[in-house]
Structures are given as C-alpha cells and as structure tokens.
Amino acid sequence: MTSNANLLQRRLAAIPHGVRTAMPVFTARALNAEMWDVEGRRYIDFGAGIAVLNVGHCHPRVVAAARAQLEQYTHTGFQVTAYEPYIALAERLNALAPIDGPAKSILFSTGAEAVENAVKIARKATGRSAVIAFSGGFHGRTFMAMALTGKTAPYKRGFGPLPGEVYHLPFPVEHMGISVQHSLDALQMLFKADVAADEVAAIILEPVQGEGGFNVAPPALLQALREVCDRHGILLIADEIQTGFARTGRMFGIEHSGVKPDLITVAKSLAGGFPLSGVIGRAAVMDAVEPGGLGGTYAGSPVACAAALAVLDVIEDEGLIERAGRLGAVVVAKLHALAARADLRPIGHIRAAGSMIAFDLLVARDADKVDPAAASDVLQRGHALGLILLGCGAYGEAVRLLFPLTITDAVLDEGLGLLEQALAIPA
Ligand SMILES: Cc1ncc(COP(=O)(O)O)c(C=O)c1O
C-alpha cells in the first residue's frame, strides 16, 4: 500500500522545499468537507484548498459540468477560436459584480495572473504607472503580484529586484493599534513625499486580507479610498481572490461596504477547484488595452469555465451566500465561548466576515500580545486529530477557518469539536 511516509520521502526527494505543504499526508479522495488520505484516514477540511472550495470538494454538479465539457473539447485557445462557456461566464460575472455601469470580464488561470493583468489594464487605462497596496496584503507570487504583496519573508526576500512604482500603506487593524485615520494620513504623506496622486494608476486591496490575517477592511477605509480615487483619477482594484463567491456572506466581499471598485480580481472559488481567474471591470477601463495586449494560452479554459458556471448555479440554488452568514455566526459564537474557557489556550482577536473567520493565539487571556508558536502548535495538533487547518497573519499568529459553505451541520460540529481539542493546554 502507498503510505504517507513513503510519499513524503518521494516528495522530499523529487520536489523542492520552496513549495511548502502544511500537512505530511497525501490525498486519496475528497468529498464536500471531508478528505481521506492514502492510508484511509479521514479528515475534516477547514481549509478548503486555501479558499478554493466554497462549494466543497467534487460537488456533483461541478463534476458533471466539467465532465460534459471534457467530452466536447478541452482546449482551443480562446485567442484562436472562442467558445460559449467563456462568454456565458463573462456575462454572469458582469451581471453579478458590484461595478458601476456596464462591465466586461476577461479570464486567466491563476490569481496572480489576474492581479498582473488588473495592473496592466489600470496602467493602460490611466496612462500612469504607480500602484499603491497595503502592508500585510497578499496578491500572489509572480513579479508584480509579489511586489504588491506586503510581506517580505517568505514571499519577497531574495527575489529582487522587484518591479518599481509600488508603494505600501499600513492596513488598519484595530488590535495592532492602526486606525483608518493612520492609513489615510499615510496616503496623504505618500502623495506628498513619494509619488504624486496624478501619477498613481491604481490602489489595490483585499476587502478582507487573506494571508495577512483575515483583517476586515473597515467600510470607512473603502469609502475614503473610493473618494480619493475619484478625486485623483485613480482606479480602485478590489482583490476578491480569497473573499469572492459567497465566502463573506456576500457574492463579493466589498459589497459589505457599498463601495464599487473599478476593477475586481477573482480566482480560487470561482471554478470550484479548476484553475481559473479573471478581471472584471468597468467596460471603458477594460477596453483600454489594444487587441492582443491581454490573454494567455490556457486563459479561460473551457473545462474551468463550465465548472465555474456550475459553481455559480450551486451558490444560488443552495443559498450559500445566506449560509455563509449563518454558519459564520454559529462559529464565531463558538469561538467566543472557547475564548472564555480557562482550560484552553488563550485565544482572542476573533474576526469574521461571514464564513471567513480567524482568531489569534495569545500569550495570556485578555492580553493583546500574540503567540505564533502556540498557533503553530494548534495547527499541528488539529492536523494530528484529523482537522485540516491553516494559519495566517503577519507573524503566523492566527488560525483561519475556511470550511466549504456546503459543509453539513454535523460535520461542522464535529470539526469544531476537534478544534476545541486542538486548543487544549498541553499537559
Ligand atoms: C487575495 C489573494 N490574491 C492573490 C492570490 C494569488 O492567487 P494564486 O495563488 O492563484 O496565484 C491569493 C492566493 O492566496 C490571494 O489570497
């Protein structure tokens, strides 16, 4: 029998450690919110393949749609002969996205590719080059996305030189003492000291920071940025790659603020496990690029488009937007109860947007100081107990919960029970 130990040995010998794997187990199969490893052990999935599986592993409607497409054609290259699934998906995204006025969408394969292209489009549409992002933000591992990412190790250190004309502002995080006013003051200082506002093409941010710690962008920040962008002709880009497709209790995370961005990047849960990403934006902005300036050989794979159309149907038919809010409330209430327990490790800074939920491990109950080593222990303890859990945060101090929105109540409850056990104070 293939064992986890054997595969780990082969993996270490054949694959560089630059691509990290959170758990030393190997997948055999997975369904909805459960995964089984090659030794037959069952896990509850609170990671959803890093926010990719809002509709769960192998949703039967997504699998059926992809299978039906596989039997027709798998690839033509949209730039050679186009196909309807791409068009139908663009139409759906244009109708769903919180964009002011007519929208257009273009598809790619990965989140980083969507970010790169959003910046290309913004530069071409404005004729300007500078881009402002936020500390703690994560936008991907390609060069521009890496430059925009607001965390040095392990994402940027040693990979330079990075593309220029990228500036970072502090992201408001209440428990770190950074307010919306701090961020806005830093923006004004940036315009004074480093780059004139009329040389800025775009401001990019995540409505809820993902890798950075599930820090929710306060609506006041988004509203103020919209106003600054309007005043100076800057485009506002919402990176919805982790927040999109019902995760936060809205189709797109930015909808909580009422702010309409000019461009939106999407990926991850868009196609329920198939590699697909996109940029949705105001039609006039999207059309700024001349024919041939955008695209990619695999961009908008027909199989992934068919899967994405099924994902959007599932979100609608299974009421997943509403379910994200409801499950999120249940889990947050449970976390507050766990935070009050003296027999468990101290946790706090519980934050959530729908079912995008995180908490920090603290050095002591009611302390503000975080304990990254304890967070790492809890993740490993969870893994050993059969719970797939991911960390996040500037220092790795947070545990994030990203269960599929299709998880059954019973499996969610069981997973929360394992989380409780993982938080037990070590003997
Ligand atoms: C907000 C955000 N943007 C961009 C990316 C990059 O996406 P990908 O890994 O598909 O390139 C990620 C991935 O975690 C993300 O969370």
Image (spheres, grey):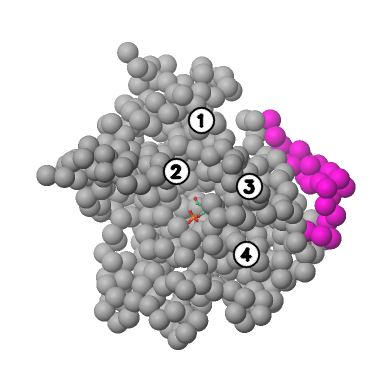
Type of residue at label 4? Ala
**Which mark identifies residue 397?**
1
Point out the tag, 4 or 2, that comes first from the N-terminus.
2
Mark 1 burial class by Cα count in 10 Å: few <14, some 14-19, many 20+? many
Mark 4 burial class by Cα count in 10 Å: few <14, some 14-19, many 20+? many
Type of residue at label 3? Gly
- x, y percent for residue 32: 29, 53
Mark 3 burial class by Cα count in 10 Å: few <14, some 14-19, many 20+? few
The magenta segment is 177-200
Q: Is mark 2 within 8 Å of ligand 1?
A: no
**Which mark identifies residue 18?**
2
Alpha carbon separation for disc pair 1 and 4: 31 Å
Q: Residue at x 63, y 44 (%)?
A: 150
Alpha carbon separation for disc pair 4 and 2: 27 Å
Q: Are marks 3 and 2 in contact (CB under 8 Å)?
A: no
Any part of residue 123 in sight: yes
Point out the tag, 1 or 2, that comes first from the N-terminus.
2
Q: Secondary structure at mark 1?
A: loop
Circle nearer the viewer, 4 or 2 = 2
Q: Are marks 1 and 3 in contact (CB under 8 Å)?
A: no
* Disc 4: which residue: 118
Alpha carbon separation for disc pair 1 and 3: 27 Å
- x, y percent for residue 202: 72, 59
Q: Are marks 1 and 4 in contact (CB under 8 Å)?
A: no
**Considering the image in quadrants, where does the C terminus appear?**
top left
